[in-house]
Image (cartoon, rainbow, N blue to C red):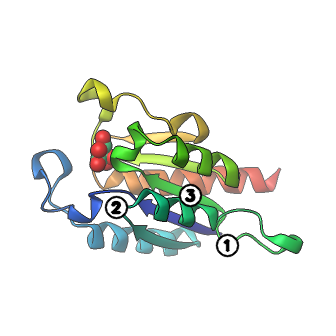
Amino acid sequence: MRVLVLHGPNLGLLGLREPSIYGTEGLAEIDGRLTALAAELGIEVECRQSNHEGVLLDWIAEAAPQPNGAPRRFDALVINPGAYTHTSIALRDAVSAVGVPAVEVHLSNVQAREKFRRRSWLAPVCVGTVAGFGPDSYALGLRAVVGYERARAAK
Ligand code: DQA
């Protein structure tokens, strides 16, 4: 199983950005932890970050069904869409279009913050959301999507 982990806008600044909200761990450390967890789970993970909505859309499209029955390049998604969570119908449509299980993750508890963060356009097309556990949100999200996809494939 190959899982694509996507970090959206401003997440390249983790460790420096508002540490009281997002903590002091940088993205490289988070990705390192996810790579170690992937080995433990017996899967492959690829982690990418972009500030650009269109780039994120193109990356999500890599999980789409391939022509002539070739295997998909990714079997599941873990995505922290950053502020695009609250604005991007295009990201929602992309996740919905590719048809692989996706888990939305947030470092902070978005429900406990400003009102505008309470709405996610992506949540309805994801199998679930993990928010509020700092970098552990990603690890929990990865475990969850792997468990979900394994159970689905075993049916
Ligand atoms: C975030 C929450 C978003 O509301 C915010 O815009 C971010 C980070 C989080 O991980 O807590 O950029 O996705």
Say which mark, if any, is on residue 92. Answer: none
Which of 126 and 98 lies nearest the eye of the viewer?
98
Residue under numbered circle 2: 51
Q: Residue at x 26, y 57 (%)?
A: 10
Instruction: Answer with mark 1 or mark 2, whichever residue precedes in sequence.
Output: 2
Image height of 126 relative to 18, above or below = above
Please state which of the two labelled residues, at mark 1 or mark 2, is closer to the viewer: 2
Residue under numbered circle 3: 77
Amino acid under label 1?
A: Arg
Q: Give the spatial CA distance, label 1 vs label 3.
A: 11 Å
Instruction: Answer with mark 2 or mark 3, whichever residue precedes in sequence.
Output: 2
Amino acid under label 3?
A: Leu
Q: Position of residue 43 (x, y in %)?
A: 59, 72
Q: Is residue 133 visible?
A: no
Q: Residue at x 21, y 61 (%)?
A: 14
**Hey, which residue is sitting farthest top in the picture?**
115
Q: Give the spatial CA distance, label 1 vs label 2.
A: 22 Å
Does 24 sit left or right of 31 as displayed?
left
Residue under numbered circle 1: 73
Disc 1 C-beta below 8 A from ligand 1: no
Does 28 sit left or right of 101 as displayed?
left
Q: Residue at x 50, y 73 (%)?
A: 46
Amino acid under label 2?
A: Asn
Q: Position of residue 143 (x, y in %)?
A: 51, 55
Q: Give the spatial CA distance, label 2 vs label 3.
A: 18 Å
Q: Is residue 55 visible?
A: yes
